[in-house]
Image (cartoon, helix red, strand yellow):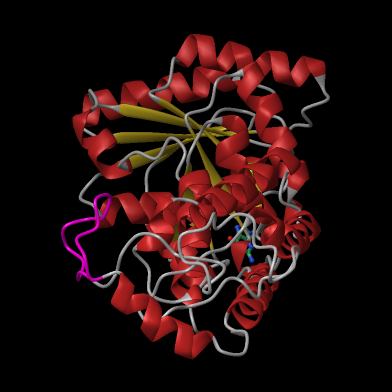
């Protein structure tokens, strides 16, 4: 999952580390000398560091008190001034980061990360690497890791909420409607989610609001029968809102916690069908509307998310087929662009192949050693 993106992030980290940890001749000697000079209490220093880990890192070790940002002796545009001193102090200047950041930008765009999101990540990485936190880290490796991790987590975490708690807190029955284009995995996701909810202690009923496609009832009935789950259907051509409404009545009468309302796949460019989605939203007034799309669709998924959100406001996203996605572009971008969180990842065709989306876990996976 997301292996291509992981490789590109690894490359960026290696590039920065390689260049930054190539100290110039004499740096070691200067270092100890420099540490000695820092014995006196440091006015701006944080209290939890040793006295020799002052906050001022000098680019030019011969003139410790001169402005670090001139860097004239070392020549601009290289990362050689990004030295890891014995105290762990680093200095990385803006121009030093230009090339690695440009490479990272290409890498992100090449992974189908949306342009505004890529920009946001770059800005955050740069800010961390040039900012205050550099004084607290010990090696370039840690600095790059932290900068990338924070930037990615920040961007991916937009709008996150605890799904299980939300269901627990909502008035029962909780109706969830699933929207999205054709064939992305809506019906499969509903089947999987029924299992996931059962594990969390919630009962559910499926309501087939896909009254449009021939064979839709038969398909979802198969899932219901394998999973031994209650299913509400109407004839093909019926009113989708009415089916989901029936599901709600059934749930109410039978103390079922959650109604999982399927809808027919539709192109976001189809005005009629998008209008129908608005109507379902109005009549059913679901607790949650979840937009389903394929992780592999990259920026197309991001664009569609915006279109569906405009027709019937979504509360979250499920990205399916993450198991087949190397780029990770949709996973990185969609929450930031739509303002709605990714709630689950579909990771295969089996009923158990659904994961609660955890931004930190995903980023750890992307930046991990494996
Ligand atoms: N590899 C993989 N395949 C998936 C995943 N989720 C769904 N699929 C497959 O995608 C195909 C389409 O799934 P459906 O659930 O029928 O998609 P849909 O969105 O309901 O399709 P329509 O009702 O036609 O709009 C099926 O073959 C699923 O097994 C996933 O997370 N990973
Ligand atoms: Mg379907």
On the image, the x and y values in percent for residue 220 come to 55, 47
On the image, the x and y values in percent for residue 217 come to 60, 41
| Residue 357 sits above or below residue 365 on the image | above
| Residue 196 sits above or below residue 257 on the image | below
Q: Is residue 285 left or right of residue 186?
A: left
Q: Is residue 354 left or right of residue 259?
A: right
Residue closest to the eye, 47 or 107:
47
In percent of the image, x 61 and y 24: which residue is there? 309
| Residue 22 sits above or below residue 328 on the image | below
Magenta residue span: 39-51
Question: In what quadrant does ligand 1 lie?
Answer: bottom right
On the image, the x and y values in percent for residue 188 come to 56, 53
In percent of the image, x 72 and y 65: which residue is there? 100
Residue closest to the eye, 54 or 187:
54
**Residue sticking out furthest to the right:** 269
In percent of the image, x 28 and y 53: which residue is there? 198
Q: Is residue 112 magenta?
A: no
């Amino acid at each position: 999952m997301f292996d291509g993106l992981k490789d590109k992030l690894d490359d960026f980290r290696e590039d920065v580390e390689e260049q930054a940890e190539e100290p110039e001749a004499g740096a070691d000697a200067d270092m100890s000398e420099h540490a000695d000079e820092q014995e006196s209490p440091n006015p701006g220093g944080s209290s939890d560091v040793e006295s020799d880990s002052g906050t001022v890192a000098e680019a030019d070790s011969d003139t410790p008190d001169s402005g670090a940002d001139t860097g004239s002796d070392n020549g601009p545009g290289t990362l050689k001034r990004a030295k890891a001193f014995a105290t762990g102090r680093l200095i990385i200047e803006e121009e030093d980061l230009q090339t690695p950041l440009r490479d990272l930008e290409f890498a992100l765009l090449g992974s189908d990360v949306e342009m505004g999101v890529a920009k946001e990540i770059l800005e955050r990485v740069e800010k961390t690497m040039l900012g205050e936190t550099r004084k607290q880290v010990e090696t370039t490796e840690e600095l790059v890791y932290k900068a990338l991790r924070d930037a990615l987590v920040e961007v991916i975490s937009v709008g996150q909420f605890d799904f299980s708690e939300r269901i627990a807190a909502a008035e029962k029955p909780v109706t969830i409607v699933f929207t999205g284009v054709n064939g992305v995995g809506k019906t499969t996701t509903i089947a999987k989610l029924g299992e996931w909810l059962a594990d969390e202690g919630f009962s559910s009923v499926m309501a087939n609001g896909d009254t449009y496609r021939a064979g839709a009832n038969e398909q979802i009935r198969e899932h219901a029968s394998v999973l031994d789950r209650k299913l509400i259907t109407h004839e093909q051509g019926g009113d989708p809102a009415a089916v989901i409404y029936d599901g709600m009545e059934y749930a109410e009468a039978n103390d079922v916690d959650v109604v999982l309302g399927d809808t027919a796949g539709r192109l976001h460019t189809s005005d009629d069908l998008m209008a129908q989605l608005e109507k379902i939203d109005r009549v059913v007034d679901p607790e949650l509307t979840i937009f389903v799309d394929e992780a592999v669709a990259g920026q197309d998924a991001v664009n569609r998310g915006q279109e569906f959100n405009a027709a019937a406001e979504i509360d979250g996203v499920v990205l399916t087929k993450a198991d087949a996605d190397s780029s990770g572009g949709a996973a990185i971008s969609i929450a930031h662009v739509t303002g709605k969180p990714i709630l689950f990842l579909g990771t295969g065709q089996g009923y158990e192949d659904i994961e609660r989306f955890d931004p930190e876990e995903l980023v750890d996976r992307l930046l991990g050693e494996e």
